Amino acid sequence: MRVAGLDIGSRTVKLVILNGSEVCEKRCLETSARLAEQLTDLLSGLRFDRLIATGYGRGLARELFGAETLTEIKAHALGVRHLFPEVRTILDIGGQDSKAMVLAPDGRVLRFEMNDRCAAGTGRFLEVMAQVLGISLEELSEMALSADQAARISALCTVFAEGEVVGLIGRGEAPERIARGIISSIVKRSLGLLRRVSPSTPLVFTGGVACNRAVVRLLEEELGFQILLPEDPRITGALGAALYGASSLGSGPGKGTEEGLAG
């Protein structure tokens, strides 16, 4: 049986298709304003027997394609544990939200926290700050790693933090120090989220922000231990959705949902 897992996020859409236990297709693209058309085009011509959707747009996939739906928490837990059976804590930072969860040894979600009401501490925060500096996200990461110290950015809101960065530029602060201050800011928020779930090791970092080397480096320095990273940190939710469909947890194509299930 070929099972498709679709993770529809606010910034990106991820697709994983499993043929048995093997990944035979994976795609990742930026979320379009014409989401319904985008999803239809994405799935057109692909062969699968079952479709499981997760992410903020999962309801649309249910309406359009009769997809089964799965909560993001459950999807990420399944996907990460498949890649790292020893995982105990997951930190996921995407484009518009971030989440931290602690798993039991058998994979059940024991605790989780989400920050989905503000872009601070997410990929969108990094995008806005990079735009203010007039550089790419890759350049932001490299500049942060080359800095001797971080400029202080204390605002908890993306809009106010943007104003702080503009002020730092106006006072002649070194761009490298500003970049490190931006990365330090997102790391600080991530640590706060992790503390609320009382993390255990090993910790796996997922989501688009996990592709940022500076965030990973500074987070490891603050935590005092090495973080585990998937080969592609963006697709764990889609992978988990596909794994759910391939398991005996579902209730048949187009019929089952796992809305509201945390563990």
Image (spheres, rainbow, N blue to C red):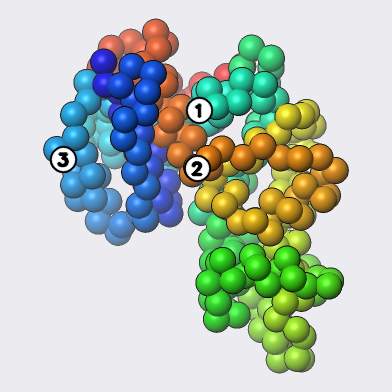
Q: Earlier in the sequence, mark 1 or mark 2?
A: 1
Q: Quadrant of the C terminus?
A: top right
Q: Which residue is labeled 2 in the image?
A: 232
Q: Amino acid at mark 2?
A: Asp
Q: Percent from the top left, x then y, of residue 185?
A: 73, 62
46 to the left or right of 33: left
Mark 3: few, some, or many residues within 10 Å (few <14, many ≥20)?
A: few
Mark 3 lies on residue: 44
Q: Is residue 80 visible?
A: yes
Q: In this rendering, which labeled residue sits more in front, label 1 or label 2?
A: 2
Q: Is residue 52 visible?
A: no
Q: Earlier in the sequence, mark 3 or mark 1?
A: 3
Q: Residue at x 76, y 55 (%)?
A: 218
The quadrant holding residue 247 is top left
The percent position of residue 237, horizontal first and vertical second, equals 47, 34
Vertical placement of residue 189 versus 25, above or below? below
| Contact flag, marks 3 and 1 (Cβ < 8 Å) | no
Nearer to the camera, 90 or 2: 2
Could you tell whether 66 is left or right of 31 in the image? left
Q: Which residue carries the number 1 mark? A: 79
Q: Please say if the residues under marks 2 and 3 sit with CB atoms less than 8 Å apart.
A: no
Looking at the picture, tell me which residue is in the foreground, 173 or 26: 26
The image shows residue 245, relative to residue 65, as above or below, that is above
Q: Amino acid at mark 1?
A: Gly
Q: Are marks 1 and 2 in contact (CB under 8 Å)?
A: no
- 117 vs 202, nearest the viewer: 202
Q: Residue at x 66, y 84 (%)?
A: 166
Q: Earlier in the sequence, mark 2 or mark 3?
A: 3
